[in-house]
Amino acid sequence: MTVLDETPGAATSAPVPAHRRRKPLGTRAYKVFRVAALVLVVLFLLAPLAWMLLASLKTNVDIYDTGKALLFSPTMENYANVLQRNNYFVFIFNSFWVAFVSTALSIVLGVPAAYAMSRFTMHRSALVVLMARVIPGVSLLVPWYYVFSNLRMVGKFEVLILSHMFVALPLIVYIMMSYFDSLPLELEESAQVDGLTPIGAFRRITLPLSVAGMATAGILSFIFSWNNFMFALVLSGAKTKTLPVAIFDFVSYASIDWGGLMAAATVVTIPIMIIALFTQKYIVSGLTAGATKG
């Protein structure tokens, strides 16, 4: 027979459900502040994009009219002017070709270089490569133009590809070095014990494991090349003009065609936004993969 203890204070109250527990005031205030701050940041970043998109659907008269900031009659004349009359499809192909080839060549050269620097601890060589990334590109334009003009190469795709590789290659090496540092060396040693050569272990073990890092480096390199204006402005020609340089044609000495300029800017921005939207998880995973070891 069980005897219940009926003394005062012996009975304990039932635990309060988790959903009924009152959260501290400081925690709730912090969450409200965080949400408000995120909303403000998003609005601050999206406001220029929204204005660009709306302006691309207006005439120049409506753009200057503050009363028609939101309420106006949209027109597709600016896009027709950009894509049909100015033949922007050629400039789109030029930008894609230069970005694709420069990124592909930079990956082919940069990944083995990053692997060698990582495995053989070539810190001084890595510092030299990183210094090439830090040097301002504008300081190289005059020497490049002088050299390539004497070689009669100004205005060709080869010059644009080489100039973009000067920035893309150090970026890829820097990212891939951190990624290779995070991969255990024991995997390659086990592969060599099983009979693979060091190059075979790199090709069959290390390289497949570094696909996320290569995707990250390639995407960032492609975005840089697609958006580059300075190199193409000086080194491109009439047949190799890229999109950022073609947009500059809407700016004249006397006036600016804001409608056509915003339509062309939208054509440049949309592909990069789509690429970033669908590849953001690869960019984040690739950049954070080399943050920790072990």
Image (cartoon, helix red, strand yellow):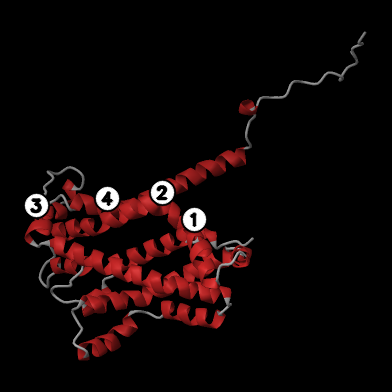
Dot in front, 4 or 1:
1
**Going 32% across and 84% down the picture, which residue do you hit?**
140
- The type of residue carrying mark 1 is Ser
**Going 10% across and 62% down the picture, which residue do you hit?**
87
Spot occupied by residue 53 in the image (x, y as percentages of width and height): 22, 51
- The type of residue carrying mark 2 is Leu
Spot occupied by residue 24 in the image (x, y as percentages of width and height): 63, 37
Dot 2 corresponds to which residue? 40
As measured in the structure, the alpha-carbon distance from the residue carrying label 3 to the one carrying label 4 is 19 Å
In the rendered image, is residue 34 in sight? yes
SS state under label 4: helix
Dot in front, 2 or 1:
1
As measured in the structure, the alpha-carbon distance from the residue carrying label 4 to the one carrying label 1 is 29 Å
Residue 60: numbered disc: none
Residue reaching furthest to the left: 85
As measured in the structure, the alpha-carbon distance from the residue carrying label 2 to the one carrying label 1 is 26 Å
Dot in front, 1 or 3:
1
Dot 4 corresponds to which residue? 50
SS state under label 3: helix
Is the residue under label 1 in contact with that under label 4 (CB below 8 Å)? no
Which quadrant is home to the N terminus?
Answer: top right
Label 2 vs 4, first from the N-terminus: 2
Dot in front, 3 or 4:
3
Residue 285: numbered disc: 1
- The type of residue carrying mark 4 is Ala
